[in-house]
Amino acid sequence: EAQVTQNPRYLITVTGKKLTVTCSQNMNHEYMSWYRQDPGLGLRQIYYSMNVEVTDKGDVPEGYKVSRKEKRNFPLILESPSPNQTSLYFCASSSLAGTNEQFFGPGTRLTVL
Amino acid sequence: RKEVEQDPGPFNVPEGATVAFNCTYSNSASQSFFWYRQDCRKEPKLLMSVYSSGNEDGRFTAQLNRASQYISLLIRDSKLSDSATYLCAVKETGRRALTFGSGTRLQVQP
């Protein structure tokens, strides 16, 4: 089944404790992206990657890091989480050729205390 | 001003009603347009792309008005299962990233 998976789905942590949210897709997509979704602000892009070893900042990159060592994986790293990073996070992927449809993972609900 | 704006709603309509949402975008270089559906606490899923000439998929019709810079989504004969948040998304020429609106919530009531 074609899908984007994220782990963990729910996470409660404390300020300053480094964490990683994993994202993996099995559709051989070149493009992957991370969004955060907050009430009234919609989906905002954090980082994206056009292919392996190619990453770039989105609209709200501060406080986040990403890496793209393999085509299927695109982890999101919070080196020192803060309460304002409490949010719902979505990973998405799409093919660079053909359809523009972005496929989203199920989301990770993060709470930073 | 936000790049992509939507009325947050909620739109409360009875079953069988016709409802329409608009989404305005500020960048005239925007090239591609989409409607996504998002159920509560779930991921967004593509509902339909929006083509220049307008397009229809069953009870759903999408339209693009480039002159006024908005897209619309019309839902006919609303079903209870149509209750969700509808997000518009816009892609600018040369960019892969989508810019999303904050969504319009639809509640179809029996």
Image (spheres, grey):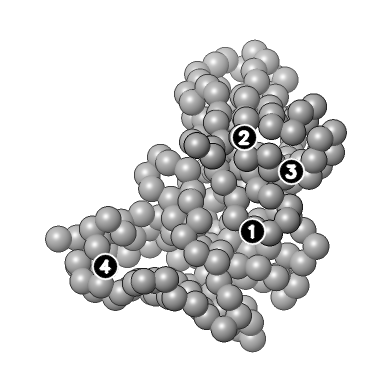
Q: Report the chain holding disc 1.
A: A
Badge 1 is on which residue?
A99
Residue A5 location, quadrant: top right
**Viewer-closest of B37 and B28:** B37
Cα–Cα span, label 2 and label 3: 10 Å
Q: In the rendered structure, find residue A44 and report the number of the disc placed on it.
A: none
Viewport quadrant of the N terminus of chain B: bottom right
The residue sitting at the left extreme is B110
> Which mark is nearer the camera, 4 or 2?
2
Q: Report the chain holding disc 3.
A: A
Seen at 68% across and 59% down, the residue is A98
Q: In the rendered structure, find residue B78 and report the number of the disc placed on it.
A: 4
**Viewer-closest of A62 and B51:** B51
Q: Tag 1 or tag 2, which sits nearer the N-term?
A: 2
Badge 2 is on which residue?
A25
Q: Is the residue at mark 4 from the same chain as the one at mark 2?
A: no
- The secondary structure type at the circle numbered 2 is strand
Badge 3 is on which residue?
A30
The residue sitting at the front extreme is A1
Q: Amino acid at mark 1?
A: Thr
Seen at 49% across and 26% down, the residue is A9
Q: Is the residue at mark 2 from the same chain as the one at mark 1?
A: yes
Residue B18 location, quadrant: bottom left
The reply to whether discs 4 and 1 touch (Cβ–Cβ < 8 Å) is: no
Q: Amino acid at mark 4?
A: Ser
Q: Amino acid at mark 2?
A: Gln
Q: Position of residue B38 (x, y in %)?
A: 43, 50
> Which mark is nearer the camera, 4 or 1?
1
- The secondary structure type at the circle numbered 4 is loop
Number of residues whose C-alpha sits closer than 10 Å to that of mark 3, classed few (under 14), some (14–19) or many (20 or more): some
